[in-house]
Image (cartoon, rainbow, N blue to C red):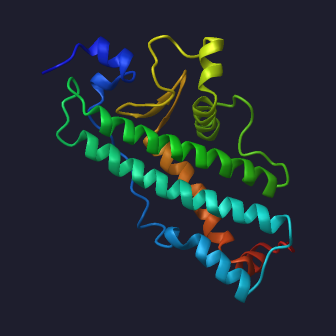
Amino acid sequence: MQWNPDILNSLVAPGISTFTTAEIPDLSSEFPQADWWITNHFLNTVLRARFRDRWRQVVLGFVRRAQNAFAAYHDARTLTLEYLDGNDPLNPRVRKYYASVSAWEDFVLQVSMAIELFNWLNGGGLAFRRNDGSKEQRLYSIANHVKHTSKCVDSGQCQESQSTPVWLANSGIASFGVSVSYAEASGILRDVAKLAETFQDPYKFRRESGNAD
């Protein structure tokens, strides 16, 4: 059985009838300690050195969001590739599709929180400027659409045919008027992961950066 593409695109998710492939980078080999960032941070804080209060709390929050984002990204990657494997786009496996979308939503939400914590740690220096079109700004906008879908509906930002705040395309993840390629998403995660790698050891961070905190 196959469905009319217009029915699928309007009632399941935009573009689902043409979603057939995805090239999603795997970063797990680049960051083998990703599953242990939080544990490493705790042990290094107890046994080596710790950040001063306030900085310590925000750093811990960043490391937690980074580890969550790393896990969510790779869960999303696995679920997306499993959905595409043998899938008929005109008779899609809806449950698997929504599971993939949920993992991507978790990823963008975790990254958006990591960005806010980074802005604080960076002394108010922002990861992006309002509507600057950067990949970080676009991903942050997607996270806001996930959090505030009803406001997007009320404002007309969400079209009537757009059933979900996040959907998947061959090129990347999309939302209301904005998208991020899979390569861009992996690039953002890589930047977050590199910072988490440094924050997992306060002693090493302080020596290499010269930061007294």
Q: Nearer the viewer, residue 210 or 165?
A: 165
Above or below, comparing residue 93 to residue 15 in the picture: below
Above or below, comparing residue 166 to residue 34 in the picture: above
Instruction: Quadrant for residue 182, please give it.
Output: top left
Residue at 38% across, 41% down: 99
Instruction: Answer with left or right where residue 205 lies relative to residue 211.
Output: left
Which image quadrant: the N terminus?
top left
Q: Nearer the viewer, residue 80 or 187?
A: 80
Residue at 68% across, 82% down: 44
How far across and how far down the image is residue 33, in percent? 51, 73
Above or below, comparing residue 2 to residue 87 in the picture: above
How far across and how far down the image is residue 12, in percent? 36, 23
Most extreme residue toward the bottom is: 47
Residue at 40% across, 53% down: 75
Above or below, comparing residue 194 to residue 82 in the picture: below
How far across and how far down the image is residue 201, in percent? 68, 77
How far across and how far down the image is residue 73, in percent? 46, 51
Residue at 70% across, 28% down: 131
